[in-house]
Amino acid sequence: MRLTNLLRTTVSAAVVGACAFGIAGAASAQQAPQDQPTTIDDIIVTAQKREQNLQDVPIVVTSLSQEVLQDAGVRDIKDLQILTPGMTVTSTSSEASTTARIRGVGTVGDNPGLESSVGVVIDGVYRSRNSVGFGDLGEMARIEVLKGPQGTLFGKNTSAGVINIITEAPSFTPGFNAELTAGNYGQMAASGSVTGPITDQLAFRLYAGRRVRDGLMDVDTGDGPRSETTDGNQDFGTVRGQLLWLPNDNTSVRVIADYSSRDEFCCVGTQIRTGPTYPFVDALSNGTGQRPPAAGFGPLPFLRTGYANRATGQEVEDKGISIEANIDLPSMFGGATLTSVTSARKWTSSLGQDIDYTGADLLYRVQDGDYGFSVENLTQEFRLAGSNDTLDWLVGVFATKEDINRTDSYYFGADYTPFLSLLLSARLNAANPALPISPSTIGCYTRPGQVPSNPVPPFGFLQCLGSGGAVGGGGPGFIVGQGVEDNYDQESTSFAVFTNNSWHVTDAFDITLGLRYTLDDKSLEAQQRNINGNGATCAAALGNAAAIGAVLGANTPTILGNFCLPWANAAFNNRNVSESFDDGELSGTIKASYRLNPSILTYVSYARGYKSFGYNLDRVQTGITPNASLLFPSEVVDSYEAGVKMTLLNRTLLLNATYFDQTFEDFQLNTFLGTAFVVESIPELTSRGVDADMVWFTPIEGLSFQGGVTYTNAEYGNFTAADLTNPGNFPQLSLLPGARASFAPEWSATGSINYDRSMGNGLRAGFSLAAKYMDDYNTGSDLLPYKQQEAFTTLNGRVMIGTEDERWTAEFWVQNLTDEEYIQVAYNAPLQGSAFQTTVQPNGTYYNPALDTQTYDAFLGQPRTYGATLRFKY
């Protein structure tokens, strides 16, 4: 029985993506007789943890086969978005900060204290952060993208969706394949696998791959000492070994061990708008230090040149083992199947960063292990599932223990003190031109026992400023070198019981009920440390607050705030944080489906999703006072859907459409304020719209069309400062009430054409084109206008020739064929101007475009890449 099921699963996996919707290039996955068109049959998915025909599942699922993924050049979840309407995947300051969003909903991945809105599951193992699922996925049997909250079955609850990845399993039929790739930007890749029996009951599969590429962006190294003049290179390898043991007809055990590593330089941002602080960067840099501003400080044209005087190296290592056992129980248990999935994983990163992304030597992090994070997971899941003529039932338990450790470090460059002096003196000069702009006034603020004014030595504060700091200063400036060494250790345990059951009321009418109760317990131990005398400058300036206030008046809080930014604040000297919290939540779903006839299924559903609370693993302060607690609450979502699934034109056309209405409460918004990442719970976010998908296998042999479109109206509810966990965050979030959410294009569409057929003489040839259109959307969580990305389209193409038995295949491919220029994420450049004001502006927010002095940087999308791939299969 177990062996029969295994063989059936293997066959199904070859068919899944060929007939699924929203895909690129699938006609060859299922061979029909030469005189008949390919039809849509037996598309098997596991969206409800049991094998079901896609058109029988009342869920929006995009299922993509190995062939489809290969044709579209998908190697990781970022590549996956070209095949999935309504989905975006971005990365920011490193490839360790990756975020997937579905229907405009997701959480910026820079803060590991946040769980992912879109869950990643690989071979039944839940990966708690998108970044730990971002890498070469190796040999993929298929990928299923489930849209909307999945509150019952997939590991921890996810509030926006699930990316379910199934890799190729060992086979008892001996086989070997190899792949060689070469392309522009110095791309070189090699991979291969071998599979076969060890004994009559034991089979294996071994996969290994290596991939390298030169940098995609030119870098101006400014003051140095950075030596790398490009950024965004690629250098990673993966090894995955598997064993499949079939001790008897009723049992299968699959063991998977994998290891992958990345050693790369990534990711330098570039200016998309340079503000009025440019002269100061220019004055302190070897060269301009950043892109010169446009006239009137307007937007800058697209350019793949960044500025960084410090190295941006990153090392990422991911390893783990999982064991899945499936046992068909005796008939006395109703023919049920017991499934056990056990896993242990460890993911680590060590990163370097030029924090300011200029040629000036301001702030940076060194790749010495003091900046990065690690995630260690142990998971255990048990499921018992069975079925009879009227009921498909499933019950289970899930438990996980997770340890997250984040280390943080800041280094002050030699230009930090003079740069801050230039910023502060320029602010005073604008109010009083008699006070010169100078790189030497910091000591005026920090000299011990400073007085407002004094006509004779020692000169007072006002006289010191008036002389540009040349006379009467003498106070300490900011240290040069490492000033921060923080450590955050978050431990969590989660336990859940769940059930998912489908009642076949009649042959045409089904009702599905899923419930899950989750109990989470998390604790945080953090040590925030200023080292090497860091914090003394802040403390000295605060000690002179009375003298400074007597001269500067209303400007004083802002001026002192610049001395006590999170990385220089004396309040973090030897600060310890210890917190713990636990919470339970009921989630689940109820669905009703009715088959009007063999070709049309209609359904309605309600689902409640849940994303756990957590801790903001960063220095967080209000004004200059550290926040007493780093806890943020859980996020919940209520989702309603109504859909139809149709198989038409003699089973050659698949057409599905779903209306969705999702309301999120306490949406966990992670936003970068230019000085730190802050997590704020937004009271309400709604996402409403339509998902539609189609596949048509035409009467022309080997020719198929596929496409999908998602319309999304994702908006924040109206709220005020009083509605936030920390009302002090409202000025930087004042553009959000009633506005469209970031990364939520109104329209998103995919389309593809695939042609693949025999050419005679034992050869076959074909081509495929896959396109993704994204309407305009904002790439910043604070919705500042300069972060808007205009509508764009990306296009991937492939031409193939090879033998009909696939002994060899040669492909010529191109990604981003039209070399579309677009940004992934825009952000506020640290210390380089300000966007939001301290008082309400005429438009009712704290933002006034006429007063916006902020320099904006962005991480860019990839340019056109092309190359050739040669595959061998035996």
Image (cartoon, rainbow, N blue to C red):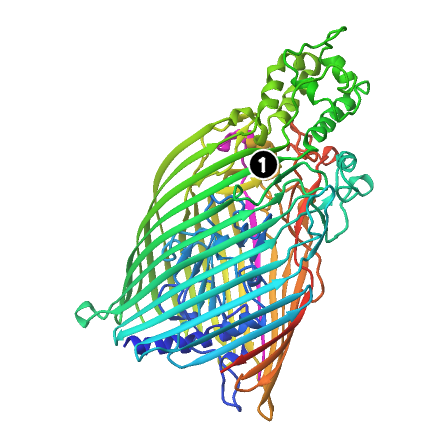
Q: Quadrant of the N terminus?
A: bottom left
Q: Nearer the viewer, residue 105 or 530?
A: 530
* 671 in the magenta segment: no
Is disc 1 placed on a helix, strand or loop? strand
Image quarter of residue 79: bottom right
Residue 808: percent from left, percent from top: 56, 83
479 horizontally vs 49: left or right: right
Label 1 sits on residue: 410
Count of labels in the image: 1
Residue depicted at x 58% and y 20%:
539
Residue found at the far left of this picture: 332
* 720 in the magenta segment: yes
Residue depicted at x 62% and y 68%:
188
Local crowd size for mark 1, using a 10 Å CA cut-off: few (<14), some (14–19), many (≥20): many
Residue 84: percent from left, percent from top: 55, 63
Q: Nearer the viewer, residue 578 or 392?
A: 578
Residue depicted at x 44% and y 66%:
240
Q: Nearer the viewer, residue 678 or 646?
A: 678
3 horizontally vs 304: left or right: left
Image vertical order of residue 301 relative to residue 839, above or below:
below
Residue 117 visible in the current orientation: no
Image quarter of residue 749: bottom right
Residue 96: percent from left, percent from top: 54, 51
Image vertical order of residue 480 relative to residue 220, above or below:
above
Task: Provide the residue span drawn in magenta.
Answer: 702-728
Looking at numbered disc 1 in the image, what kind of residue is underneath it? Answer: Tyr
Residue 777 visible in the current orientation: yes
Residue found at the far bottom of this picture: 761
Residue 51: percent from left, percent from top: 37, 70
